[in-house]
Structure formats: C-alpha cells, structure tokens
Amino acid sequence: MHSILYSNQSGGICLKHRLKIGFIGLTVFVISFLTACSGNGSGTGNNGDGSVTKTTPAEPSEVIFYTNNGTTEELFNSSFGDALRKKFPNYTIKFIGRVGQSNNMPEMVATNTRFDIYYSSIGNFENNMFPYNIQYDMTDLIKKHKVDLTRFEPAIIDGIVKSSGGKLYALPVFTDTLVLYYNKSLFNKFNVPYPKDGMSWDEILELARKLTQVDGGIKYTGLTFIPVYTFFMNPLSIPAVEEATGKPTINTDARWETFFQTLAINPTEISGIRDYYANMKSILEIIDGFQKTETIAMVPYVAGWANSMPDNMDWDMVTLPSFKGQTGISAQPYSYYFGITNMAKDKDAAMEVLNYLVSDEMQTTLAKRGSLPVIKSTDVRNTLGKDSKYKDKHWQAAFANKFAPVPYKGIYEVPVLAIYADYATKVMRGDMDVNTARRLAEEAAIKTLAELKK
C-alpha cells in the first residue's frame, strides 16, 4: 500500500510531550499501511478459513475512526474507508485526523468528541489510549463475533495482551518488521557477493568491511542503520522499562550489553563506518545516502520502505541479520493496533468493521500492494507485493525468519527507547564509551520518566 514519511509526529515516537532526543531529533518513521484477519458478527460471519460471508443485513450505523499520526482522510479512504463503505453500505464510515495541533488527543478528550475506533502504532497506541482511560476490553466482542485469534501471528497478539494486562484492547490490522536493504550496484561495483537470507551480523560486517572504501574521491559506507527503529524492534526482545518497577532496563538487563556490542561497537570498528557517523548531522542522511547518492551499501529498515524506493535504483532485500544464538529470529513486529473505545456508540458495528479489516479478503488486497499481513495464512503472505511496482523484489524476506517475541511495552516505552537510541548513536559517533553512554542514558530515562509521571 502507501508508505508515509512521518517526521516527529504524534503517531511516531512521542508521548504526551514531544521530546527532543539529541541530534537525532527523534528520527524519521516510514509507516507502511498493511493488512489484517478474520471476521463475524450480526452482519458478517467467519467461515473458519478467513473468508467472510453476509448473514443478515447490517442495521444502519455510524462508525468513526480517529488517529493522531498525521494520516490524511484521502489516505484513510484509499487504505480502508472506501473498502468499508463498499462492504457495509448501511454504515456511515467517518474519519477524524490530527491536523497540526488541531484534533490532538488531549483536545479530543477535553471536548468529548466521540470516536469509535482509535488506531496507532504499537507503543503509541498505549501512550495515547491508556492515560485517558478510553480503552475498551474487546474480549467479549471478539468471542461474540467469532474472531479466530489463532489465525493471527502469535507474536503480535501476545504483544497486545502483555501490554494490556491480559486484556484485548485492540486488534492488529497491519504490521511491519526490519529487513536488510542492499544496493546491488555497489556490490557489483566492488565485486562483493550479495547478502543472503539467514546471515549473521558477523557475516554482514565482513561484507560491509569490503564495501567501505574510497573510490574516485567518493566515500562509500558498507552499513548504516537507524538506531531508534532497531531499539524499538530489537530482536533480543528487551523491554525499555521493567514491568514490575517501571525502572529503566538499560543497566539491569544483560541483553543490552550484547545489543550494544553487536550494533553500536562492532560496526564502528570499521573506520569508514565510524567516520560516517562522526560526520553525520541528521539521520535523514542515511535515507539520502542509500536512495539518492547511493553511497551506502546496506541499511536495516522497515519492510514498508520498499514502496518508497527510486525507480532507477538497483536494490533488493534479505532477512535482518541474526544475533549469535538467535539464528532464524528476526525483529519484533511493528504493528498498528485498532481498538474500540469505551465511548463507541455501537460497539457491535465497530466490531463488524474490524472483523472485515482482519479478513483474508482485506488482508490479501492490502498485501498485494506491499503491506505485511498480520495473519499466518501462507496463501495471503504469498501475495505480498504482487501488485507493487517492485513485485520482482524479495518480499518474502519479511517472513523468512520468525518474529521476535514482543516484550512488555508500557506507556513510557517510546520516549525511553528514544533516549537509549540517542546514546547509542553517541557511542557510534565516538563521543563517549559504551559504559558512560549507558549510565547517562539511564539517568536521562529516570528524569524523563519522572517528568512524564507528573
């Protein structure tokens, strides 16, 4: 489907306040609109195979969607609205979106503006719903409408349950994960073999070493990555804060040591990569370096980025490299949650709408456009990217490895991980050693948590 470039918006990395995270400025988010799973209700029925059939005519109703991630009404309609109106002609489907600071969540709640379904990305969904206590446990509705949760990717559903205290405040409707993009022209130029699915970070660094060089006065960098995404979707499934205490984990969870060593220290032992980060002024330079100047050979990034590639670039993607002892494990899924609110006027109608969004029919439509489905169906997954202009690319890299489990993500996950990512970048730039960075990151996280809890 469509890929939207968001820069520091409410649907990206932020909580109630917009935090400034060092020179990263809270980076850029590429959010691809993806797909969903099964359905049933008074107007629709789930056949058990993901198909949806009409049973009784739906009574007229109104279902209002709201998101504060910067999505336009035009994009909502092309992604979901038009399909829902066609499927449910008796329903009035409306959309409210944030425009600048207008229609932000505090304003929506303060003015008692009703919306039936709120949607946003994992982390941001919790950050916006929970503080205002507008979430609604959909467990009984899901049973009533016979939504088969076993058809979903387990890691995604488990993530929702973990962050909801065992309840179901949402269903996932599209997702993303990290893959490794590579510029085939640079590999050909330097006579280096292309990366393959299932490679480790050590193997990728060997390729990066050969590709990091100066040629014709132009500096080429073998590997760069955008820290904030890598932290948020980390394959080691490390939470930002402890669920029991709410304290930062940066110095208490031993897995962070492995994470920093593998992704912040080892790559920058290659002098050209270290120099690149030392001279980088904006994270946007990585995007431009890969897509425009074509001086960066490899970038781990979200699979949804694929539809934003330039037409004249020779590129492809493979699985995200694995950590030692984690062969076959990819990043965590980065899903968009759609949750019925406690103010919803007709919760059954809202549930029917969500049911359709998570049907094989809608999943397939979205997957063909290049959006990662949230269900396990091989038939649906095999359609990924088939209608994209890049249908010849290796879309299945997104599914070749197993998703990493989603850890507990409380309402402070996003700003805390952004702090961790900022200090990791300082290590990569050579501004400080890793021990100092982790200590300062913990101090900054504690201070931010105290401010957010006021």
Image (cartoon, rainbow, N blue to C red):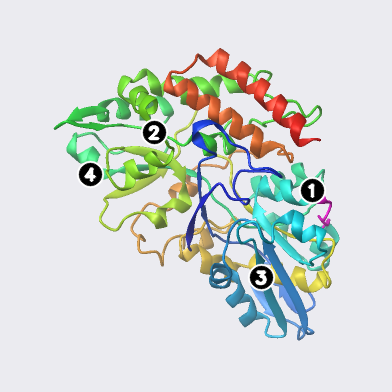
Circle 4 or circle 2, nearest the eye: 2
**Residue at left 38%, top 44%?**
287
How many residues crowd around disc 4 within 10 Å: few (fewer than 14), some, or many (20 or more)? some
Q: How far, Cα to Cα, is label 1 from label 4?
A: 47 Å
Q: How far, Cα to Cα, is label 4 from label 2?
A: 17 Å
Q: What residue type is labelled 1?
A: Phe
Circle 1 or circle 4, nearest the eye: 1
Q: Which amino acid does label 4 sit on?
A: Ser
Q: Earlier in the sequence, mark 3 or mark 4?
A: 3
Q: Which amino acid does label 3 sit on?
A: Phe
Q: How far, Cα to Cα, is label 2 from label 1?
A: 35 Å
Disc 1 target residue: 130
Determine whether the residue tagged by mark 2 lies in a helix, strand or loop: loop
Quarter location, residue 279: top left
Residue extent of the magenta highlight: 131-137
Disc 2 target residue: 224
Disc 4 target residue: 185
Decide which of 4, 208 is in the foreground and name it: 4
Residue 244, image x and y in percent?
81, 29
Q: Which amino acid does label 2 sit on?
A: Thr
**Dot label at residue 95:** 3
Q: Which of marks 2 and 3 is nearer the N terminus?
A: 3
Circle 2 or circle 3, nearest the eye: 3
The answer to whether one can see residue 328 in this image is no
Residue 39, image x and y in percent?
70, 69
Q: Is residue 153 above or below residue 186?
A: below
Q: Are marks 2 and 1 in contact (CB under 8 Å)?
A: no
How many residues crowd around disc 3 within 10 Å: few (fewer than 14), some, or many (20 or more)? some
**Residue at left 84%, top 71%?**
345
